[in-house]
Image (spheres, grey):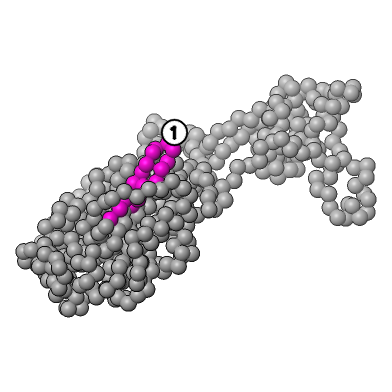
Amino acid sequence: MTGKENMASAELTATEKRVLLALGGEGGREEEQRSLSTKTGINEDAVMQTAFMLAQRGLCEIEEAEKVFYRLTEEGKAYAEERLPEKRALDFLIENKGASFEDLKNEFPKTVNIAINWLLKKGWARIERREGEKFLLPTAAVRAELGVDEEILEIVDKGEMEWEILADQIKKGIPLKEGEIKGFLSQLISRSLLETHSRVERKIAITEAGKEILSQGISVEEEIAQLTPELIRTGSWRGRKFKRYDVNLASKETFPAKIHPYQRILDRMRRIFTEMGFIEIKGELVQSAFWNFDALFVPQDHPAREMQDTFYLATRKLIDAPEVLIKNVEQMHEHGGSLNSTGWGGKWKRELGEELLLRTHTTAVTLSYLASHPDPPVKVFCIDRVYRRETIDPTHIPEFDQLEGIVMDKGVTFSHLLGCLATFYKKMDFPSIRFRPGYFPYTEPSVEVEVYMPERGWMELGGAGIFREEVTNPIGVKYPVLAWGLGIGRLAMIGLGLTDIRDLYQSDIDWLRKARVFR
């Protein structure tokens, strides 16, 4: 061999040489994966991996085709031997000139329902009432021969068959078009008598470049694929040939398990507030209008309480609160209770407070907790699902998550509230934060929290404030309560680079695989 020839074959591994020699034998005809494995003595997976490596070098070509195979289920095997239930039942009906449902049940106790169902579906029998009892009468004048479905079962019972071979076998016995055959196959699959699976069949053929390599002559030498301690200790690696590796080839793409990106954001928020000394609390998804609205000093005629904004459950339940607390809320709404407040006036209706609904915010949970823990200090947060009648669009959905938090203690001020929120958002990697005056029915003063995004400008992500005395007084809280409710969806959209909030809840496997993992 010339130096050029040596160089061409030297680039091939021993395994690649064996595969190339097998492809070049017998006139260079196409080989299937299984036959190539048999000829080379290399397992099928390894032989295909080697063939792909040769194909990258242009030394062979690989043709792939996905083929569908059919095989009988255990039930299908039983019916192939015994005949279909409806055929056996039809024989019984013809022989007895009809039969009652009870007679059929006694004759075919295990398959009577299947038999009757398919007798009627195939039009082989009709129902007739005699003295209040149902009878089945055959509509076929003579005993039916084996149908296409049973013939298919008999054919496939011989062993697993590929679609084209199966279709040819059926056509030999019954003149049917491919569409009709597929219809019968689909019916048998729906009856769980037949099942399918697909397999990629590959054919490998040597190219002219591959033949050129062979014509120059190649020899197969044993190669060391892995340097072991034994080889090093004995020195037997000396003078041996090592398998070549192309370090420039791209590695196989892998998708390791990871937490859903949105769940990672929720977990990160929990971690931040826990590190800041908060305790997480939970509450029921279904709340009474009392805790969701009334206790928060939302008037009973407020638009947010209407059906177009709230999911009501069309049922009521006694308010789960002490009677004295309910009375305090009632008086606060009607005339301001013991405070220097006018309340909302009018008559507060207990039955409206008893209405059950899907909570529109998690403030119902934090307020209920505050009512049962009126002594300072209280420092809790809640991350959970809330529901509102929203028109679905890229930035609104009727079911979303909210982050709620409260701090109640002696001497806390509005400045503490702003500092707490600023700390949270900075830990969430939003360095530019601003607060704008806002209005909420149950806090005063109130602010809206905005963060700055270079590509979007200022974005509002939540509201906060100090609970009004009309909220804290009826539940027995005597000190200031700092409160906030932050929208998680928009924050997650920013962090994940999404433009549609619905993408957070869709199981798009491609997006989940490619979504970056962040702390």
Secondary structure at numbered mark 1: helix
Residue where numbered disc 1 is placed: 171
Q: Residues within 10 Å of mark 1 (few under 14, many from 20)?
A: few
> Which residue sits at x=41%, y=58%?
419
460 drawn magenta: yes
Tally of numbered tags: 1
Q: Nearer the viewer, residue 116 or 360?
A: 360
Q: Quadrant of residue 57?
A: top right
Q: Quadrant of residue 479?
A: bottom left
Report x, y in % for residue 464: 31, 57
> 257 left or right of 371?
right
> 154 left or right of 141?
right
Which residues, given as a range, are shown in magenta?
A: 446-462
Look at label 1 and name its amino acid: Lys
Question: Can residue 152 be seen at all in this image of the molecule?
Answer: no
Q: Nearer the viewer, residue 229 or 268?
A: 268
